[in-house]
Image (spheres, coloured by chain):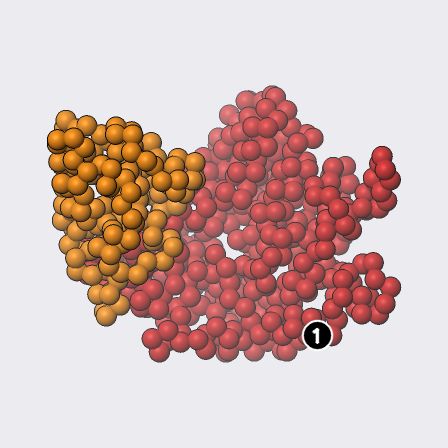
Amino acid sequence: MDRVSATTSHVLDTHRLRADFPVFEELFDGKPVAYLDSASSSQKPRQVLDRMRAFYEHEYANVHRGVYRLAERATEGFEGARRTTAAFLNAPSEKEVVFTRSATEALNLVAYAWGLDNLGPGDVVVITELEHHASFVPWQYIAHRTGASFRHIPIDDRGELQLDALDGLAREGDVKVVASNLVSNTLGTINPVERLAEWAHGQGAIMVVDAAQAAPHRSVDVQALGADFVAITGHKLCGPTGIGALWGRKEILEAMSPFNLGGEMIRSVGLQKTTFNELPHKFEAGTPAFAEAVGLAAAMDYLGEIGLEAIERHEHALVEQAMGALEEIPWIRVFGPPADRRAGIVSFEVEGIHPHDVAQILDWEGVAVRAGHHCTQPLMTRLGVAATTRASFYLYSVPEDLERLVAGLYKVKASLG
Amino acid sequence: MSEFEQMYREVILDHYKSPRNHGLLEPHDAIAEGENPLCGDEVTVSVRFGEGDVIEDVGFEGRGCAISQAATSMLTDLVKGRTAQEISVLPKEELLDEVGIPLSPVRLKCALLGLGVLKVALHRTKGTPLPEEWSASSGEITLS
């Protein structure tokens, strides 16, 4: 792998890092995109693209069953990616790392394979008002299927979880599942997952963490979190699409029924009975996205060389700058907690102007933001809006992106306000 | 600003800021409402018939993006004096020509929300055909 342009230091040399990302050579009206939609998906560095190309050119065959050398190389690439992912998450064992298509699939895996066997009437599934639909809806659905009740931890007006609601939830039945994101994809709120995990375990419940929005930006240590399941996705952390991972506690994964059936998850098949493979293969049906797993590992190596702490500090500085600038504008309302308690995400409303119109006009200025409900409709209802405009940052974001955003917002206001 | 003028032509801004036929008719002969849950656009359209099934007057209310509200405003001008039968089979291109700007698939749903709602209102009172794309089961637009 090529060396990254900037190594671990207290400050990111963002302008040098940007040279790793070919997308910034693409010009729109003579300018590179001010890409403020990394919470949706991140751009890709050459190091990831080059690694995947090399894998396809020199190491590619189907994994696991081949007896020839090329298949061994491919298997080593895939299983090496699993070791990298385990280390990235500080998992006790790589056998606890299951590759999935996405964080969504990882969360569905838990909801189906654990939930269908372990939930019933009288049980309570607890989620948060901040959940992404990928966590919210699988649990809502499985709770409905099993007769369990489905309750949420409300947020306060700043978008932070109201933990004093927990005791009331515990009185509603046997709490069996607590599911929360580590970072809210809409508001950027950093949730106190360690405390939730402790509470969940006190209730005899499992703690399921959606870390899709956290893992690209801060170090995620599954042991320190005290969680039972942690889901991540590759495409938000400089990796390819189509690959995600589920970390799960070994004893729980081993006791669980399989999710999808077929392929490497099988040990032996008879006319009447099939036995299943050991962890982690038991949960990986079909030919996995192993080239994408190799790309994911390259992305984790890339982030590791830069340093997640440096990335987090860089984004924090941008959030402070963004909130400072936006909160000064009287016709803009910023949602969510103060800068010191949020990740690199700022959702806001431009008074009287629909977010779609805001995003459309910003696009003509070369500023890419997201407008919509961000797959958090219950949160939109709580905020009393149909949609918001969201700007989000990553290691390649620069203060100029924010200056272009603010200048663009004044054009929006002049046109439609 | 050239793209701006191309996309949000002045006529769209004008319809957005000063919508025609704004406000629901009381009394009315037909009414329907719909929303585009993807972006939260909402439109309610009310109709009063004249002789036969001629649309004598139409009024709407709604909230949402400029495209959804302006297109519905343009629609109200377009349909007055025409028959329910005629409007029930109105090709969407006729409205889109009025809107007059290229629309991405996401924005197309915004632009066509009002037309869909109107066709549902006509269907309910006059039994005019309801194109499949506007049936409640399409999943893309929620009609009630």
Number of numbered tags placed on the structure image: 1
The picture places residue B11, in percent across and down from the top left corner, at 16, 57
Name the residue carrying label 1: A57
The orange one among the chains is B
Query: For this rendering, which residue is in front, A30 or B94?
Result: B94
Colour chain A is painted in = red
The picture places residue A358, in percent across and down from the top left corner, at 30, 57
The picture places residue A55, in percent across and down from the top left corner, at 70, 71
Q: Is residue B116 above or below residue A371?
A: above
Chain under callout 1: A
Query: For this rendering, which residue is in front, A345 or A156?
Result: A345
The picture places residue A282, in percent across and down from the top left corner, at 77, 46
Q: Residues within 10 Å of mark 1 (few under 14, many from 20)?
A: few
The C terminus of chain A is located in which quarter? Answer: bottom left
Query: In which quadrant of the rendered view does residue A399 lie?
Result: bottom left
Q: Is residue A242 above or below residue B130?
A: below
The N terminus of chain A is located in which quarter? Answer: bottom right
Is residue B122 shown left or right of residue A1? left
Is residue A321 shown left or right of residue A344? left
Residue B4 visible in this rendered orientation of the protein: yes
Q: Is residue A132 above or below residue A328?
A: above
**Disc 1 marks which amino acid?**
Glu
Q: Is residue A306 above or below residue B38?
A: below
Query: In which quadrant of the rendered view does residue A235 lie?
Result: bottom right
Is residue B100 shown left or right of residue A300? left
Residue A332 visible in this rendered orientation of the protein: no
- Look at 51% across and 66% down and name the residue there: A43
- Look at 54% across and 48% down and name the residue there: A182
- Look at 69% across and 30% down and name the residue there: A117
- Look at 16% across and 35% down and name the residue there: B54
Q: Secondary structure at mark 1?
A: helix
